Amino acid sequence: MKHLTLKEAYDFLQSNPDALLIDVRSEIEFLFVGHPVGAIHVSWNDGPEWDVNPHFVGEVRKLTGHGGERPVLLICRSGNRSEVAGKALIEAGFRNVFNILYGFEGELDDKHHRNSVNGWRFDGLPWEQC
């Protein structure tokens, strides 16, 4: 799996219109915290039990057209869930999987707050929320 910084991911998406940006966070995070413009939501895990979505790979496969060649960029809150989800895709035969470092909300600062050090939103990249 390849890792991209936030700016690299944004630039990649701009220059590769066939690439998919998949937000693997929970539905609540995606809807109410916000998400990158154009992101497609496919939870890696979700509440209330936070079990891994057993249909994750199949849902992504449907979105990519079953070929496994289409670039898939994964984003989560901080880059951890997206990395695990990316490994699952690679194990399932996907070849062009990218993890977006620092995710949508970024790393924790000294006061354990997000959105103050890095992240999609912090870097001023296009995002929206419900």
Image (spheres, rainbow, N blue to C red):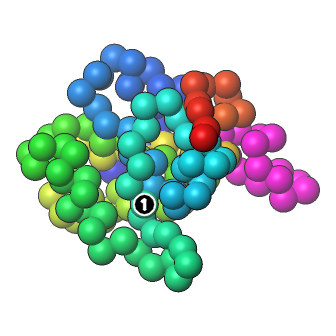
Pick the front one: 124 or 31: 31
In terms of image quadrants, where is residue 67? top left
> Disc 1 designates what residue?
43
Indicate whether residue 55 is drawn in magenta. no
Left or right, 42 with reference to 59: right
**Residue placed at 25% from the left, 57% from the top?**
59
Instruction: State whether the magenta stretch is mostly helix, strand or loop.
Output: loop
Q: List x then y, in percent, for residue 104.
A: 60, 43
For the question of whether residue 2 can be seen, the reply is no
Indicate whether residue 107 is drawn in magenta. yes
**Which residue is farthest front?**
130
Pick the front one: 13 or 51: 51
Q: Is residue 103 above or below residue 124?
A: below
Range of the magenta residues? 106-119
Left or right, 64 with reference to 100: left
**Residue placed at 55% from the left, 50% from the top?**
30
Q: List x then y, in percent, for residue 85.
A: 38, 61
